Each structure stands twice: as C-alpha cells, then as structure tokens.
Amino acid sequence: MLSDETNSLAPLDAFQAGVRNVCGQFLVSPPDGARDMRGLITLKQRQALAVAVVRNSAARINRDWRCIRQDSAEHLFLVLQKSGHSVMRQGDADVRLAPGDFIMIDSAYPSRFLYGDSGSLQYSVHLNRSEFAHRFGTAALGGCPIPGSTEIGMALRATIDRLVNSEDAAAAQQHFIGEAFFNLMGAYLCGLEAGTLASARTSDELLVTKARAYIRQRFRDPACTPASVASAMGVSLRALQRRFQAAGLSLSECLIATRLEYVCNRLMAQKSAGTSERISTIAFDAGFNDLSYFNRQFRARFRVPPGEYRLHAATSSAKNPTQ
C-alpha cells in the first residue's frame, strides 16, 4: 500500500522523465478515467548491477515499437513486485504479479505494465541484454515469468533485497551479493532450458493456488465471496473464474466445498466428544449466512441432510455417507 506515501511522490510529468532517464523510452499515463497519477523512480548502483526502485500511485506504462526505435534496447529488466499488484504483458501473455512474484522484461520487445489502484512498489534489476545472453543463453530473451514461490525465487528475492539495502556495504560485499544473484539466475535458467522446472508452474496456476490458499484462510468470514477473493488477488472476478475453469475447478464450488468440509469436521468432532451443538451455529460459523442455502448445498454434496450426516459420523463412511 502506498497511500501514505502519495504526497511524497512526483507528479506525472516528473515521473515520466524519471522513467525515461533510468529505464529508457516508455510512455507513462494515468489509469483509465483518471487525470493524473504520481510516482517516483530512483536508481541504486551496486558494483556490476543497478536496481531501480519504482513507486507509483497507479499508472499504465507502455513500450511500443516507436519507443524501442528511440533507444538502444540494451537491457533486460528483472522486475520484483514488492507490494501492490500489477499486470505485465510481453508477447501474447498477461502475467499477474502479486508481492513476491517476478517477471523478466526484454527491452527489445514491446511491453505493457498496468498497476492496481492501491499503488505499487517494484524493484527492477537492470541487466545488460547482450552480456546476459552471452553468459546464460537465450532462455530469458523475449521475457519470461519467474514464480516467486519456488526455492530459487525466494532466494532471488532475498538477494535483491540485500542488493537494494547494501548502499553502505563495502565494495567487496556488494560484489559477492551480485555474484550470488547471477548464480541463482543461472540455476533457474538452466533448469528452465532443461525442462526440470516445467516453467515452475504458469502464472495462471500460481494465481489459482494463491486464491485457494486465501479461501482456506478466510472462508469463515461471510464477507469472503468469489468477488472478494478476486479483489484480494488483484484481478477481476471474471478473470479469476476463467483461470479456475482452465484448471478444471470452479471458484464458487471451491469456496462452498471448503465451508462444507469445515461443517463436516465439526459434526464428526461433536460425535467423538459426545456433544450436540446446533447445526445452524456450525453453519454460521463456517461462513454461511443463509440456512436454506446451506441445507441445499449440503444435500447436493452428501445426498443427506446435516442431521442425518451427524448420525452416521462415527461410522467408517462418515466422511461421505453415500459411499
């Protein structure tokens, strides 16, 4: 969240000039329906590496072929999303970044960045394109996502944090941190080329995984709805539903199933403890706010009402009495 920092950010024209000075030719514009936005970009030089720290209140940043013809297109940008959400496009795919996610952007090809209304903080590691290709081959050219949930992703994130915060460190220490960064990049790209990472899961799969984890944490709150889950993921409800469908799942059914599983576990625990809590109390505690709806969903899944399920809870078929 950058709302508390908004007043310290520069207006659109100054931010546009800063982006061009640090990153090259990019077109910065306010989000749809807005007249202005604010942002700040600073460059931290660390021996052989440079890291841009980019804050903005909400913006659309584009790099088209006209921009590319106006500069040398000599960089790869490894972008780490530190806070807020963004959508990055290079090639034919949109990659949604949540805090901790990466993407490699190739300045030799068009790209587009969209930022959420809550603002964004990103670290962008600037890498010489030709030197990087000489060192690691062509796997990163044209851009590629790097999921932050992998072990290498987590190590990269920690290394970039150290790079940004090593301003007062000795030159030798900065050098070793930089070498650690290149070693991790090499390990990731070698695995990617060898097929051992299987792209470390696609960005869509990561989004579905994060949404399911969010549901497991928040399902007991009646305000946890498909729309609120999508909002927390920084995407539209329709976009999140499409990604669940592509994975053979349903967003709504995932939420309902999580709540029903909680109810079933409570019913079984009651039987073991010899207690008899009201089923309506359990249903409301699971996040349902309509008893009729709860009963319909329970019957649809287990083919018996909750009271009958509880009677069978101590049997071997209690988890699903219809089996």
Image (spheres, grey):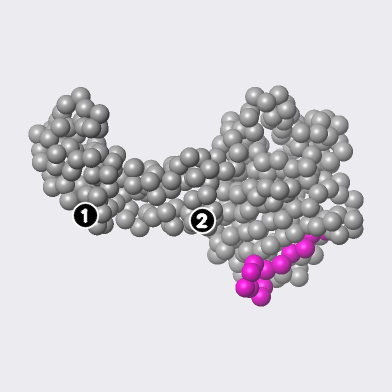
Disc number placed over residue 169 in the picture, else none: none
- Give the residue displayed 31% in from the left and 49% down from the top: 220
Residue 133: x and y in percent read: 83, 34
Disc number placed over residue 291 in the picture, else none: 1
Q: Is residue 289 one of those drawn in magenta?
A: no
Magenta highlight range: 25-37
Image quadrant occupied by the N terminus: bottom right
On screen, residue 145 above or below 73: above
Total marks in image: 2
- Give the residue displayed 23% in from the left and 40% down from the top: 303
Residue 254: x and y in percent read: 39, 44
On screen, residue 26 above or below 204: below
Any part of residue 2 in sight = no
Looking at the rendered structure, the kind of residue marked 2 is: Arg
Q: Which of 265 and 155 is in front in this view?
A: 265
Residue 23: x and y in percent read: 80, 54
